[in-house]
Image: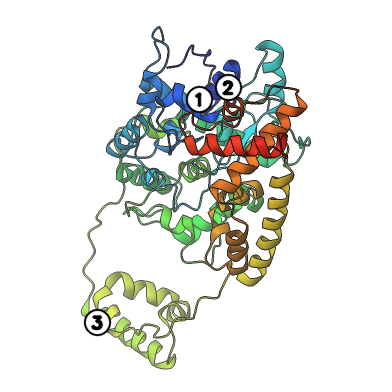
Amino acid sequence: MMNFLPIIYDDEMLYSVISRYKQMCGMVSKQALEADIFNHRRNMNTSVLFPQEINMVVKNFPPNSQVTVREVIINQTLYPFYTAFLSEQRSDEIYRGMAEGYGKGFANLLGIAGSKIKTNDYLKFCPQCLRDDMEILGESYWRRLHQIPGALYCIKHLIPLRNSKIVITDSRVDFHCADEDVCIGEREDNMYSPIIKDFNLTYIRNASFLMKENQKRKDLSFIINFYIDQLRNKGLASKSGSVNIKELLEAFVQFYPSEYLELMQSRIDVDKETNWLRLFNRNNNKNRSPLRHLVFMQFLGIDVKELFETETVTGKQTILKKRIPQLELDKKREEWLKLIENNQGASRSQLKKSGKGLHTWIYVNDRAWYDKVTPRAKVRKKRAETIDWDKRDNECLMLAKKAVETLLKKEGKPIRIIPSNIRRAIGAKRWFLHKKLVKTAEYLDKVTEDLNSYRLRKIRWAIDLLQKQEERITVYKVQVFVGFGGSNKEVKKMIDGVIREMLHPFN
């Protein structure tokens, strides 16, 4: 159980609260912290942005604490942002997962595992918030709003956010306070144009509403119908609700600078049939990133609050078709068959370009016949390899060697040389362990440190440091210093052997 609970600041992440608790207690061992927070259970699903087993954490708050599990999830995690556009049923399932622990598939449940919108690689901070906090509070903390994907600015000070040194892409993390040791970086106050700044500040204000004010939820079908209504009002959808994709794409890319869409991981290739905006308004029951919901609503000129206050929507409507005279139908069919005959081997998309108005008429009014007589492309082009794996393998191999050298020379408690730690040192994501990186994989296998070798290196480091500090060296003191479990006889024997070897080599 925790001895005390630090004051929880406005918009502070749970990760930040635990980090400050660790620092206030003077804890060095992560295991000791887990004992206080998780009742000696090793929490394998610890996450900076999406903590789980929060029931356990709150149970271990001091007895006089009035903080509830719901308050922690709503006010100290990114739950409100990532569930804002999900149904109540899915939101409740995610809530239970955070409260009770869901497991390794939690990213799939949130919809971020396969999403094109990636979370930040590092914790972000505002340099002015840091200075103000230090002056007023004597310490600083990690803010939730700074960590949402796409946030480029601090909404309070209107200056660009910076990356800290803390990598957050792994599930197993250590706890670091927001201080001058990790919050460093060059000033980049003028790195974005004024128009990008204005777009992004509006985006963050809408995100702030989701984080701090909104608790309502709407089903995806309601949201899609809401969008169709807005597109109809802007003349980008027909009375029936069919979206004019071409006009929508043109209006969208004219509204946003391409540089801003790149920064928001939402680049549009108007010629690509599968670009995200073409699929966005289809009711296909697939998760959409909250970032793209906000970007799309900003394009529509809608404040996000309007969506959640709307009670009724129309969406698509059935429009009764007028009866087409047989003569007109026969004439159009004849023209279409002639077009096919004059363009032997042409695909459907090529035929569409050759007879634009005719194609639309036949497709809308005589779809069954169109599908029956119109040929399909028989051979699809082989998709080009987009990654030069041999080049990437050589680059990764060089990075891995440098990382190993850095880890071995790093001051402080030794870090075990294993693939995951090498990857973290580089700051790479899980693609670094891809099976196509053959030379890198062989090197990682070669340098991977077995547990006993790591223990020996750690023990020698501890003895050497205790000698420099002129401390009396005992098996127990070394064991505590390196953080090994107290009941492991094998480890005690190993420590005793190393002490004899280093301090009494001739005995």
Q: How many numbered discs, if any?
A: 3
Label 2 close to label 1 by CB (< 8 Å): yes
Residue beneath label 3, please? Answer: 327
- Image check: 290 left or right of 146? left
Question: Dot 1 lies on which element?
Answer: helix
**Sequence order check: which comes first, mark 2 or mark 3?**
2
Residue 342 location in percent, x, y? 43, 92
Q: Secondary structure at mark 3?
A: helix
Labels 3, 1: front one: 1
One can see residue 302 in this view: no
Q: Is residue 57 above or below residue 265?
A: above
Q: Earlier in the sequence, mark 3 or mark 1?
A: 1
**Percent coordinates x, y for residue 186 in the rendering:** 78, 37
Residue 507 seen in the figure: yes
**Identity of the amino acid at label 2?**
Met
Residue 184, by quadrant, is top right
Q: Quadrant of residue 175?
A: top right
Distance from the alpha carbon under mark 3 to that under mark 1: 82 Å
Instruction: Tell me how far mark 2 sits from mark 3, CA to CA.
Output: 87 Å
Secondary structure of the residue carrying tag 2 is loop
- In this view, the residue in front, 269 or 360, is 269
What amino acid type should be assigned to the residue bearing mark 3? Leu
Q: Which mark is residue 153?
A: none
Q: Position of residue 340 (x, y in %)?
A: 38, 88
Pick the residue in front: 305 or 180: 180
Residue under numbered circle 2: 27
Q: Which residue is depicted at the point 42% across and 22% down?
A: 72
Disc number for residue 33: 1
Residue closest to the eye, 46 or 293: 46
Q: Residue at x 76, y 35 (%)?
A: 189
- Residue 137: x and y in percent read 65, 12
